[in-house]
Amino acid sequence: MSLAIVIVNWNSGELLKACLASIAPSALRLPEAHALHRVVVVDNGSSDGSQTLDSQTTSGFGLGSRLELIQNTDNRGFAAACNQGAAACEADLVLFLNPDTRLFEDSLRVAVQALVQPRSQPVGIVGIALQDDSGSVVPSCSRFPRAHHFLAHVLGIDRLWPRLGQPMVEWDHLDTRQVDQIMGAFFLIHRSLFDALGGFDERFFVYMEEVDLSLRARQAGWASLHVSEGRAYHKGGGTSNAVRARRLFYSLRSRLKFAAKHYGLAERALAITVVWALEPLSRAAFLTLRGARAELGELVQAYRWLWHDKDTNSATRPVGVPPKPP
């Protein structure tokens, strides 16, 4: 059971270097039967210098010939770049790792052993507990999203009754348990299962791609497991904090695509209503009360992009259903 790690980089700067530097010490704790085979970094058209790691820099990571850099001239999207990285390695297990994470000494060993350990229900995906800057474990697991989760969030109901929301914030994540979905920041999966499911759906440019894959794995009879004994650092937000309007656009876009792919007619209609009607009003009211005029402009920009995006509009139909001719 060899292991490969795939990291998708987009303007991650020094975060990427810190992530890469943390891998070799963690890989040393792996048993010989589960050795680290390859680390693939797929750069999605970065422009901050992180795409030009020189040989002197990479030699300091202790990965040697196991490190491979793939350079894309433009941003192909997170899902597509993950698939590209997975295609470049032949390991039995694949860990998709965000560049704003740092592994600890036992991160890989605990996760790999949990994935390969025999269980009554086969486990196909494993995640570990993620810590913030203070060292506290933060919620990283969620329920499979339904339209009523989107509604509860927009209305603020999930703040009063967290169990009505999608993120499992009511749980401290300090015990090991099966969950619907683990965060894509540390996403370990059997390669055979990944291939059988066709990898990530590249129609999700970014956001919801790991949710979709986890749901398809569950439908195929495979569980996702959160392992509290393993820990890793996760900054959270990553480089998307610098592009808030674009981040909101892709978040809304992916929700519409997920609804089109997985929901029935009535639930899809509710999801569309929340995204197009309730959410912009809720966000605008909140930002107005805060006096955040710049963020109001970003909200308008995100919805302008969404309105004019042909791919988004087609995604409001069930996947596979062609548009009616004009």
Image (cartoon, rainbow, N blue to C red):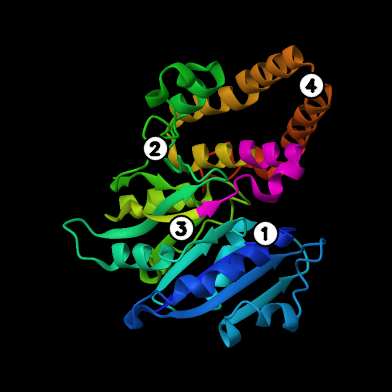
Question: For the residues marked 2 and 3, what is the alpha-carbon distance in whole angstroms?
Answer: 16 Å
Q: Secondary structure at mark 2?
A: loop
Magenta span dominant secondary structure: helix
Label whose residue precedes the other's in the sequence (1 or 3): 1
Q: Which residue is mark 3?
A: 187
Label whose residue precedes the other's in the sequence (2 or 4): 2
Which residue reaches farthest bottom? 65
Q: Which residue is mark 2?
A: 143
Q: Amino acid at mark 1?
A: Leu
Q: Nearer the viewer, residue 120 or 48?
A: 48
Label whose residue precedes the other's in the sequence (2 or 3): 2
Residue, x 60% and y 49% (percent of image)? 235
Work out whether residue 326 can be spotted. no
Determine which of the numbered discs, if any, sits on residue 292 in the image: 4
Q: Nearer the viewer, mark 1 or mark 3?
A: 1
Q: Nearer the viewer, residue 121 or 194?
A: 121
Question: For the residues marked 2 and 4, what is the alpha-carbon distance in whole angstroms?
Answer: 31 Å
Q: Nearer the viewer, residue 261 or 200?
A: 200
In this picture, residue 184 sits left or right of residue 244 = left
Residue 230 drawn above or below residue 69: above
Q: Which residue is mark 1?
A: 15
Chain part drawn in magenta? 233-252
Residue, x 76% and y 66% (percent of image)? 50
Residue 250 figure quarter:
top right
**In the image, is residue 234 part of the stretch drawn in magenta?**
yes
Given contact means CB atoms under 8 Å apart, are the residues at marks 2 and 3 in contact?
no
Q: Secondary structure at mark 1?
A: helix
Q: Nearer the viewer, mark 2 or mark 3?
A: 3
**In the image, is residue 151 part of the stretch drawn in magenta?**
no
